[in-house]
Image (cartoon, helix red, strand yellow):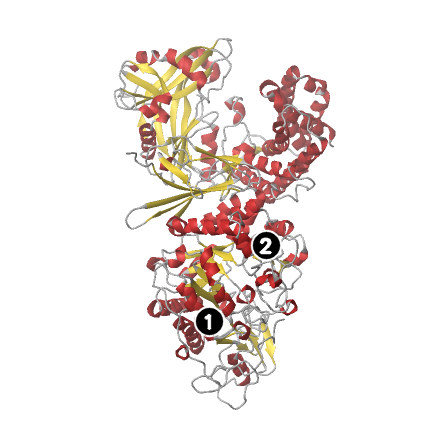
């Protein structure tokens, strides 16, 4: 566990008293990933006081393990708890429970606490195992209270006066979070394609023996939070793409290049942006070429994902052989070697923000469900390109699914959606090629393998989570199996 | 073109103090060059009180004298006709009229080819008519500015005729002459459709002369101090008569220097500072408006030194904003507008942008990328006749398919984005254009006053009209005219009048800061205009615009005004108070809202 700092008194037993409240509070939090699983118990893995525990407000950083009634693997989360002897009315919505005469609540809701966190980062403070570090060479934001950002999915953020955003990673994962790692690397390259990193809160996670499978024994570094420039006045690419598709579908007889809402210009700019990020990542963190064995390993990994999906989805099982053949296409890169470097790993239109100055790429955590060791492994940039191509398909056909849920869309609408996807996928690749000088479509077999791998994964995901959307990746899967 | 009608030598020449007739087409070979009239020869208009910064709150109205009202049945609009219509303009609520050039001219470039700076074009009337018009406008609280072309004159101007005839005479050095046509090849050719060089050979003088625009518009030589003096004296002539300012046409091109493109040179700025000083010292309260079709970052140079609040032009047109508004609505995305505003530098305290949706020129596409230009052509100029030079020549209503919702949205943007709005005559009633007329005349057809003969513009024989009235079934004068719209409070005209009135009630529109709010919906452009007066009173206006043709929700971060109440400005309906959570609004397709937001009223 974290070693208590000097200011530490005896809070551990007191904190334990909060556990029953956490069992009821956790499932109602948006970031709580295990929705639908019944929580059986919560344990405290470690804690670190940020302030003396009798301060008002007091702040403590806590790492918890959540156990489930289904006996499945537990989840680890981190909390920043605030407490006060009397409660301000505007914090009522954030209350978790009480400890003696103090009310305990989600600390990020409290402007005084978010102000404190920012001031500690700006002044480069260490408290026990927690290090509040400003990013060297950046201009610190003016210290003030933060305001919680609403509507987030997996993490929790506060915004400081449209200047900076502090993101608390809710999952507690041993190791340096790739989001922080890659933002640092891109910062060194003075990237214009990400919101500049301004600082971070880093801590340690004690690895008890029984959890040694989740990391090395002893303590592991852990990323608590990161502070970035806030991209005010931005909109995400997903909603903008949907706007464009909506415009097209409402036109009687115009092609995608003729309608006012044409997205191809943005898609080209997106291609340039992703290509620039790739160039910067390669420059900052290096590249390698996978030999035949390395490429074989990539193919094997894809085939393993295929088997997983085939078990659960009959449509995949029926086409297993044909899919495997396309996935094996990645081996065509064996003769020249497959260029790999660190990539985004979970790219889609929703991870891209349009600002008045251009596009920004956000959230470099990688696919959250995959283990960290997978997420930090260098991979072909074509994985990100393929993911974007998949995203354009989703944007094109999502509209049809949402418009009249359940109803079979007329064939002409399907064709128009396909035209939109084709036009914007091509525009994205054009923009990408402009920057890197190499067209991702040149390695068509490899690109197709990556795209199909992603589509198979999506089929599995939608089968489990969003059956209404299943038709989208299924359709793409068929198309990828047919086209040369 | 229009040359010759009513401009013959028979029109009574003004006489100068020396009694020599002006504007003789054939220069007398041995005579002294004629002297020019003085403002003392005329009475002056009554003056309006000097009001610092009036131009920052004003609504401008561009009116073509030729196209507005014809008082003498010759088929041309004239100054007396315009004077008769001042009550209408006062009723509409506009604060300042902008008149494109009304000077004596052979009219080979819509009057921008000035033959005599101190004489009114014959068919428009006389200097006396102008003074009467100005006096009547001032009586109604309406100011008047006009174009002044400093860069060049008509080749028929006495100065040019003297310059080519007598290189050693007083006007010999008034223009830019050269023995060859190779110098300053870096300067681009602006009218690429008609001109192949910026030099043209003159057989009389046996030299080439420099011209940045048409060959019949020789550039004046501002390196000659006498030219600077003559130009400033021409300004003084009209300022003495009472005019409220000038739109300075084509200002970036006054000087030429080796190794440059001849645009935005330091010498040009120095001359503008000199002009500004004359205005400040001798004619306080008058304005200079620069026409510099450049990127905003370059245009701000024409406001001059920000340290002293600006010491060149008071105003400058913001050219790239206009095509971006059109593009944003077609793309259903706020970003074309957000981008250009983010690239627009802050301006000196006493400076103001002029913004417009349409004017007498084409929809200028110089400021968009090639990519976007192709798109704009595809969207807005389906018929090749609608293109002129590198722009699109259409009026607002036909550009928007006569869609009332879009007309209102565009006008709401014009009246609320940072800058002083300039309305183009006829757009307030949704007039159409006539793409079959040549050059830019398609958007210069007669103002449509009534459903009667000649649209009420003139009682002449219809065949005598300078330009035909619009007669198509949608935009024709029988369907679209002031009289009919005056009688219906639901008309576009009444709507425009009401919006102008609302704008004038809130200083934030003209004087306030601009802060874009962003928001999760890229189809919604939302911004706050805020002005704090000397007493500390805050005027806060929230504008929310839906660029999409479909209904849209938007959540706005208004936490800075927590517990304040938005009141919708066209109807005065209070909306729910602003709380902790993002403020949710829903907008109909192409809808917009203007709110005043203010602290909750205390209840007794």
Between B209 and B602, which is closer to the camera in this rendering? B602
B436 is higher (above) or lower (below) than B237: above
Q: Residues within 10 Å of mark 1 (few under 14, many from 20)?
A: many
Tag 2–tag 1 contact (CB < 8 Å): no
Q: Residue A399, percent across and down?
A: 62, 31
Between A238 and A143, which is closer to the camera in this rendering? A238
Residue B435 located left or right of residue B526: right
The image quadrant where one finds the N terminus of chain B is bottom right
The image quadrant where one finds the C terminus of chain B is top left
- Asked if marks 2 and 1 fall on the same chain, the answer is yes
**For mark 2, what is the residue?**
B480
Which residue does the image show at 63% across and 56% down from the upper left?
B476
Q: Earlier in the sequence, mark 2 or mark 1?
A: 1
Q: Give the number of marks.
A: 2
- Badge 2 sits on which subunit? B
Q: Which mark is residue B130?
A: 1
Residue B522 located left or right of residue A475: left
Residue B503 located left or right of residue A300: left
């Amino acid at each position: 566990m974290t070693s208590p700092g000097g200011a530490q008194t005896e809070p551990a037993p007191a904190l334990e008293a909060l556990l029953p409240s956490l069992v009821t509070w956790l499932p109602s939090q948006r970031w709580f990933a295990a929705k639908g699983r019944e929580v059986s118990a919560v344990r405290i893995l470690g804690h670190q006081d940020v302030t003396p525990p009798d301060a008002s407000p007091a702040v403590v950083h806590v790492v918890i393990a959540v156990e489930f009634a289904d006996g499945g693997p537990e989840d680890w989360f981190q909390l920043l708890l605030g407490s006060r002897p009397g409660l301000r009315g505007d914090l009522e919505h954030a209350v978790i429970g009480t400890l003696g005469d103090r009310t305990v609540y989600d600390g990020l809701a409290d402007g005084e606490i978010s102000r404190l966190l920012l001031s500690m980062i700006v002044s480069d403070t260490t408290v026990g195992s927690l290090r509040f570090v400003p990013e060297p060479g950046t201009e610190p934001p003016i210290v003030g209270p933060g305001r919680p950002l609403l509507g987030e999915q997996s993490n929790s953020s506060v915004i400081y006066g449209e200047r900076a955003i502090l993101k608390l990673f809710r999952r507690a994962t041993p190791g340096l979070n790739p989001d922080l790692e890659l933002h640092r690397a891109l910062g060194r390259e003075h990237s214009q394609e990400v919101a500049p990193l301004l600082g971070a809160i880093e801590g340690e996670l004690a690895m008890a023996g029984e959890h040694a499978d989740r990391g090395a024994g002893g303590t592991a570094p852990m990323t608590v939070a990161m502070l970035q420039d806030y991209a005010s006045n931005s909109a995400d690419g997903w909603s903008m793409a949907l706007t464009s598709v909506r415009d097209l579908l409402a036109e009687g007889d115009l092609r995608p290049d003729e309608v006012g809402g044409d997205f191809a210009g943005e898609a080209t700019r997106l291609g340039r942006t992703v290509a620039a990020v790739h160039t910067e990542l390669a420059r900052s963190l290096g590249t390698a070429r996978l030999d035949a064995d390395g490429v074989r390993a990539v193919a094997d990994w894809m085939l393993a994902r295929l088997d997983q999906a085939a078990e659960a989805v009959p449509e995949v099982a029926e086409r297993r052989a044909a899919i495997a053949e396309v996935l094996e296409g990645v081996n065509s890169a064996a003769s020249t070697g497959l260029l790999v470097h660190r990539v985004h790993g979970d790219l889609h239109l929703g991870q891209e923000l349009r600002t008045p100055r251009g596009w920004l790429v956000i959230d470099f955590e990688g696919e959250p469900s995959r283990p960290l060791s997978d997420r930090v492994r260098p991979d072909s940039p074509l994985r990100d390109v393929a993911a974007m191509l998949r995203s354009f398909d989703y944007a094109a056909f999502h509209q049809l699914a949402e418009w009249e849920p359940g109803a079979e869309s007329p064939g002409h609408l399907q064709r128009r959606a396909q035209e939109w996807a084709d036009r914007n996928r091509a525009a994205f690749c054009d923009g990408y090629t402009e920057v890197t000088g190499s067209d991702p479509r040149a390695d068509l077999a490899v690109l197709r393998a990556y795209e199909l791998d992603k589509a198979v994964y999506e089929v599995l995901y939608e089968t489990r989570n969003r059956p209404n959307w299943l038709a989208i990746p299924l359709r793409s899967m068929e198309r990828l199996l047919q086209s040369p | 073109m229009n040359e010759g009608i009513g401009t013959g030598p028979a029109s009574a020449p003004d006489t100068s103090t020396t009694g020599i007739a002006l504007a003789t087409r054939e220069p007398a070979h041995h005579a002294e060059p004629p002297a020019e009239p003085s403002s003392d020869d005329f009475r002056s208009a009554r003056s309006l009180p000097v009001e610092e910064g009036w131009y920052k709150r004003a609504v401008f109205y561009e009116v073509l004298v030729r196209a507005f009202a014809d008082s003498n049945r010759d088929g041309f609009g004239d100054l007396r006709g315009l004077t008769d219509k001042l009550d209408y303009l006062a009723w509409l609520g506009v604060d300042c009229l902008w008149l494109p050039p009304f000077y004596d001219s052979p009219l080979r470039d819509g009057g921008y080819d000035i033959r005599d700076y101190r004489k009114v074009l014959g068919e428009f009337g006389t200097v006396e008519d102008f003074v009467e018009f100005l006096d009547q406008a001032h009586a109604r609280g309406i100011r008047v500015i006009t174009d002044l072309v400093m860069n060049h004159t008509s080749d028929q101007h006495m100065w040019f005729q003297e310059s080519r005839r007598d290189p050693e005479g007083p006007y010999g050095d008034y223009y830019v002459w050269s023995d060859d046509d190779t110098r300053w090849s870096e300067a681009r050719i602006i009218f690429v459709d008609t001109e192949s060089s910026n030099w043209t050979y003159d057989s009389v003088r046996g030299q080439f002369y420099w011209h940045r625009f048409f060959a019949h518009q020789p550039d004046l030589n501002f390196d000659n101090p006498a030219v600077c003096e003559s130009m400033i004296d021409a300004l003084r002539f009209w300022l003495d008569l009472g005019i409220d300012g000038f739109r300075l046409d084509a200002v970036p091109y006054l000087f030429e220097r080796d190794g440059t493109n001849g645009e935005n040179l330091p010498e040009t700025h120095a001359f503008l500072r000199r002009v500004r000083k004359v205005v400040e010292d001798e004619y306080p309260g008058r304005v200079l408006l620069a026409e510099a079709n450049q990127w905003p970052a370059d245009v701000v140079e024409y406001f001059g030194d920000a340290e002293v609040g600006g010491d060149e032009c008071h105003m400058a047109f913001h050219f790239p904003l206009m095509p971006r508004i059109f593009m944003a609505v077609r793309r259903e995305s706020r970003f074309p507008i957000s981008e250009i505003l983010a690239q627009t530098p802050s301006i000196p305290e006493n400076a103001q942008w002029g913004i417009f949706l349409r004017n007498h020129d084409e929809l200028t596409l110089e400021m968009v990328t090639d990519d976007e230009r192709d798109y704009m052509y595809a969207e807005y100029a389906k018929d090749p006749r609608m293109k002129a030079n590198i722009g699109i020549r259409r009026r607002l209503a036909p550009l928007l398919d006569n869609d009332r919702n879009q007309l209102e949205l565009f006008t709401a943007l014009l009246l609320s984005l940072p800058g002083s709005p300039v309305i183009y005559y006829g757009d307030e009633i949704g007039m159409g254009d006539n793409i079959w007329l040549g050059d830019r005349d398609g958007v210069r057809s007669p103002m449509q006053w009534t459903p009667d003969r000649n649209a009420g513009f003139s009682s002449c024989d219809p065949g005598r009209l300078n330009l035909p009235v619009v007669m198509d079934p949608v935009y024709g004068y029988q369907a679209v005219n002031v009289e009919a719209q005056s009688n219906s409070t639901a008309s576009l005209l009444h709507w425009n009048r009401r919006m102008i009135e609302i704008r004038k009630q809130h200083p934030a529109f003209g004087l306030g800061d601009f802060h874009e709010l962003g928001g999760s919906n890229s189809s919604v452009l939302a911004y706050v205009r805020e002005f704090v007066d000397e007493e500390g009173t805050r005027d806060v206006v929230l504008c929310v615009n839906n660029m999409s043709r479909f209904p849209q929700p938007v959540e706005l971060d208004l936490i800075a005004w927590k517990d304040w109440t938005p009141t919708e400005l066209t109807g005065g309906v209070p909306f729910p108070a602003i709380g902790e959570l993002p403020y949710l609004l829903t907008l109909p397709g192409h809808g917009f809202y203007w709110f005043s937001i203010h602290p909750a009223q205390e209840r007794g």
